[in-house]
C-alpha cells in the first residue's frame, strides 16, 4: 500500500500518517523529519536549515535523493506512507517515474483540507510544544 498525504502545514498529515502507518504496518516517510535529521547529521545541515527556518521548500535536487535512498530500503518494499512529499510538480513526476519503474504505483492520494484560521492556530500551538523554528508567524505565512 503506497499512499501520499497532501495538505498544508498543520493539516494533520503527520498525525494521520503515524496512526495509519501503525495500522497498516508500513513505514511513515516524512520528508520534513528526514530533512531535520540531515540538518543535524551532515555538512548539508546549514544549507537545509536555511530553507526550513525560512519557511521555504528545500530544492528538489536535495530532497529527491534523500527520498529515493529511503525508498530503496527493504522495509519500504511492501509499501509506505508519504508525508510531505511530493510538494512540487518535479517531485511528483519523479516519484511517479520511480514507482512505475519499480512496478508498484501509488494506491491512493489523501488530501487533508483545513480552513486557514484553524491551521494558523494549530501551527502556533505546535511551535510551543515542539519548539520548531519554522513555526513563527512569519515562516507560517510563507508556507500557507
Ligand atoms: P510542515 O507540514 O509544517 O511544512 P514538514 O515537517 O512537513 O512541516 O516540513 C518542514 C519543512 O521541511 C518545510 O517547510 C520545507 O522547508 C521542508 N520540506 C519538507 N518536505 C519537503 C519537500 N518535499 N520538498 C522540499 N522541502 C520540504
Image (tube, rainbow, N blue to C red):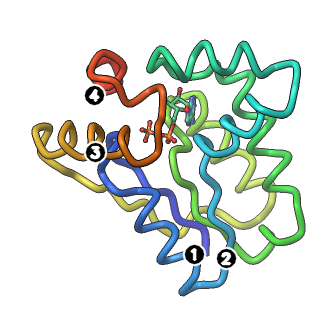
**SS category of the residue bearing label 1:** helix
Tell me what residue is drawn at x 80 percent, y 59 percent.
Answer: 102
Q: Position of residue 126 (x, y in %)?
A: 35, 45
Q: Is 4 placed left or right of 50 in the picture? A: left
Q: Which residue is mark 4?
A: 144
Q: Mark 1 or mark 2, which has the lower sequence index?
A: 1
Q: Mark 3 or mark 1, which has the lower sequence index?
A: 1
**SS category of the residue bearing label 3:** helix
Q: Which residue is mark 2?
A: 26
Q: How many marks?
A: 4
Which quarter of the figure is the N terminus placed in?
bottom right
Tell me if mark 2 has few (under 14), some (14-19) or many (20+) residues whose alpha carbon lies within 10 angstroms of its own: some
Q: Which residue is mark 1?
A: 21
Tell me if mark 3 has few (under 14), some (14-19) or many (20+) residues whose alpha carbon lies within 10 angstroms of its own: few
Q: CA distance from mark 1 to mark 2?
A: 5 Å
Q: Is 89 placed left or right of 38 in the picture? A: left
Q: Which mark is residue 125?
A: 3
Q: CA distance from mark 3 to mark 1?
A: 24 Å
Q: Position of residue 98 (x, y in %)?
A: 75, 48
The answer to whether mark 4 is within 8 Å of ligand 1 is no
Tell me what residue is drawn at x 60 percent, y 51 percent.
Answer: 30
**SS category of the residue bearing label 4:** loop
Is there CB contact under 8 Å for labels 1 and 2? yes
Towards the viewer: 42 or 129: 129
Compared to residue 17, the image places residue 69 above or below, namely above
Q: CA distance from mark 3 to mark 2?
A: 29 Å
Compared to residue 56, the image places residue 39 above or below, namely below
Amino acid at each position: 500500500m503506497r499512499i501520499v498525504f497532501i495538505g498544508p502545514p498543520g493539516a494533520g498529515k503527520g498525525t494521520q500518517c503515524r496512526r495509519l502507518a501503525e495500522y497498516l504496518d508500513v513505514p511513515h516517510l516524512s520528508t520534513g523529519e528526514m530533512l531535520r535529521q540531515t540538518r543535524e547529521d551532515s555538512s548539508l545541515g546549514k544549507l537545509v536549515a536555511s530553507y526550513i527556518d525560512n519557511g521555504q521548500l528545500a530544492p528538489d535536487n536535495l530532497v529527491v535523493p534523500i527520498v529515493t535512498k529511503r525508498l530503496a530500503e527493504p522495509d519500504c518494499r511492501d509499501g509506505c506512507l508519504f508525508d510531505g512529499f511530493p510538494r512540487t510538480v518535479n517531485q511528483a513526476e519523479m516519484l511517479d517515474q520511480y514507482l512505475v519503474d519499480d512496478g508498484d504505483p501509488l494506491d491512493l492520494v489523501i488530501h487533508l483540507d483545513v480552513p486557514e484560521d484553524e491551521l494558523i492556530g494549530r501551527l502556533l500551538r505546535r511551535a510551543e510544544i515542539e519548539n520548531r523554528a519554522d513555526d513563527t508567524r512569519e515562516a507560517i505565512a510563507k508556507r500557507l
